[in-house]
Amino acid sequence: MRVIVVEDDPMLRATFVTALAHLGVEVAGSAETADHALALVDEHAPDVVTLDLRLAKEPEPADAGLRIAERIRARYPEVALLVLATRPKVAHAEKLMALEEPPRAVGLMAKDSLGDMELITDAMNRVVKGQIVIDPQLVRQLLTPRPARAASSADPLARLTPREREILSLVATGLSNLAIAQKLSCALSNVERNLTTIFHKLGLVSADEGEQRSLNRRVLATLIYLRAGNQSER
Amino acid sequence: MRTAVGGWRKPDSLVAVCVTVVALAAAAWAIASSWGVGPPTALWIHVGYHGFGVALIVAGGVLWARAGRARVGVLLIALGTAYYLQFLRTSDDPVLFAVGFCLAFLYVGVFAHLALSVPSGRLRGPVDRAYVAVSYLACVGTQVARYLTDHPAGRWNYNIPQVNTGWAIAGSLIMAVLGVAGIALVLRRLLSALALRRRHTGPVWAMMITVGALVIVSSVSSATGRPLGFRLGVEVLMLGGAAVGVMVAYLVSAGLRWRSELRVAELPARLGGLRAPRMDALQTALAEAVGDPTLRLLLPRRDGALADLAGGPAADTRDHARARTPVTRGDELLCVIEHDAALAEGGRAITSAVALTGLVMENVRLYVQVLESRRRLLEAELAERRRIERDLHDGAQQGFFVVLTLLGMAHSQAAAEGSPLTGQLATAKGRLTDAIKLLRDLSQGLHPRSLVAHGLRETVADLARNHPGQLTYEVPDRRWPPDVESTAYFVIAEGVTNALKHATPGAAIRVRVTSDGEDLLVEVTDDGQGGADASGGGLRGLTERVAAAGGELILDSPRGAGTRLRARLPAELSGDPPSVPATAEDPPAVPGTVGDPPAAPATAGDPPAVPLAGDPPAVPPADPGHLAEGDRQ
């Protein structure tokens, strides 16, 4: 797996590159500006680019990483994108997923995960496979049931049972059915049955049971889930 | 049009007293030297004839010395003094007699002069001047002609009958004609002048007309050879009436002026309720107070020219009926009051009005400056918060991530090697993660990053997500200027924090942001125990902050009935201050700050809440646990 790292803090960039190399990830180069990043992508054709969300040296630093992601996706659609943010937000996740329709090969992780580099490399592997990765903490935060939210009829998640909610949150973090079954210590068939109910409740019923379609449905469910968390009560 | 001086010069009382004393001495000499000349006459006729001039001199002196009305005073003294010239005719000296004879009726000319120059003592326009000149000429000319042709001799006095020569009759008739013409002039002015002028000086003019009529009667009776007794009666009536009448009339008009001064004195009370009254309100109040509906305020434009409140040019029309009084503070021209010229003649009312206008406009200017500086302080503070937040993020936090990464690497290696350090490294990693989270919350409280990036709605959603209890919100999905969003967010964060701290556990907190035309309304309610106190540190700082943003903060927290924190913020914070300029177009420069932006303002609606004095601009932290104690007692 060949990686390009975009990070503006020089110390963190060096440390991150070292840590990745330590885990056997091939870091083809690192950049701190959009132009340099795009030049590197053009030169090295990486599998994945990790992007710091905020880049102090860019004209609009706050979400510069997302804008670089947009440019890379437009010119090099085969390159997977993983954004690292100090404080990931639903809005960031939505923007990433809006890069392409249907969304694919994008991820958003909190920088807190840097203490556990396996989480990062795992996320990289998954986005390279085309999956969508959302930071588990963000997902967990969104899923916390709240009386007020449950009371709102506009909330599509209100119809889900706590168990279904939990499974959906795991789907949203990008886990496969098998991984979910392992995590919940239950049978795979149980997870699949629950997922069918969830899709049904969210209005995502489809006759097409092909693999791609199944993936899209997972993504759609994730989106509904995330948007529901974002919108809350009006 | 003439420009009056802002304040009337102090009357030079000493000069006035000296002139009066000299005039009285001359009068006394004339009275003494002529007393008893001629056949025995009734005492009241003597007193009437001799007292007339004294009364006028005294009245003139008083007006000059005490009321500062030098012109009218001088004219009255001149009238009284000239009156005694006729008594020179009792002299045996032929030269004195000639002077006395020729100038015997000069006083009638002075009277005409006075009648037409009331109340200012100034003649207006060429017709008036011509009439006065003709009057003087006629009064002196007919006597000179009579002296030259009739060769009068012997002692003359009012009680000594004389032959009615042709020139004498001609002189009397000319007097009568001039009297009629004078009355016509005064009447015309009386009718065409402003209500204001009539009201103030009407009694004086009415008296003048009456006296003028008596002059005519006297002249006609003299010309037609009426018996001396009749003529003496008419003349004494005329003289006494004129003397008493003039004084009474001035007293009455002084009383009227005094009343108008009282009305001006009430101005501050009327305007006091407004921290920054609109300029048009000030104009109306001034016009009412001084009793001149034509009064208007002119403001200096940036190019130095004057403009009225509607922004239209206000060129000097050189109209004698109008006067302009500048209002200044030091060397600065705040504004110009254009008014009826009669006002300037009306004494202290306009002076007081000018002083008050100056005060009010100064107040307006200071108010604008305070608003401006508070807004700048707020902006500076928000910018500083953003800077600190950025520094924390770009510096400290990234450094922590470096350490976290290194710790993570060390931990996995230790774990792989089964090192005894594994546990400690795991603990260190956990502690560091907690510290990063703390730092993140702190910087979020300083200035929530998502506010700039995603706006108020997303930031409040974020707040709600991290909120441990029940928090519902309703925020329009739109953007406002950054400072408005920041202030609104701090109100929400403070309200939520307070509710969390003080409301009964599990109390429902509701955040509601609505847009009401130009204003942003922020409301945080809880169904807790109520009893919040706005004088607590956090809320007081928040009051300050909201006021600086040009808004107001209202706390409604009856004990036992929940708490409602409401803020109204002008949605357009950046740019002009929250008040609207006084003029719709082409705003004149702010008084005293020529070239600087907005015009003297006038608050359109509610003025911003009064800041609690002496309170340092507290920083309400957005995260729980940082709120100053004592917000509720």
Image (cartoon, helix red, strand yellow):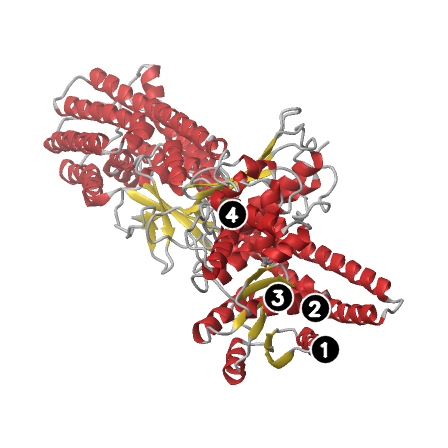
Q: Which residue is mark 1?
A: A22
Q: Secondary structure at mark 2?
A: helix
Task: Kindly indicate whether the residue at mark 1 contacts the one at mark 4 (C-beta within 8 angstroms).
Answer: no
Q: Residues within 10 Å of mark 1 (few under 14, many from 20)?
A: few
Chain ID at mark 3: A
- Amino acid type for the residue under numbered disc 3: Ala
Q: Which residue is mark 3?
A: A123
Callout 4, which amino acid? Answer: Thr
Mark before the other along the chain sequence, 2 or 3? 2
Task: Check residue A196 in the rendering and tell me which mark sits there, or answer none.
Answer: 4
- Do marks 4 and 2 both belong to one polypeptide chain? yes
- Residue B436: percent from left, percent from top: 72, 60
Instruction: Say yes or no: labels 1 and 3 on the same chain.
Output: yes
Q: CA distance from mark 3 to mark 4?
A: 26 Å
Secondary element under disc 3, as helix, strand or loop, is: helix
- The residue positioned 83% from the left and 65% from the top of the image is B425
Q: Nearer the viewer, residue B463 or B387?
A: B463
Does residue B189 appear in the picture of this structure? yes
Q: Amino acid at mark 2?
A: Met
Chain bearing mark 1: A
Same subunit, labels 2 and 1: the answer reads yes
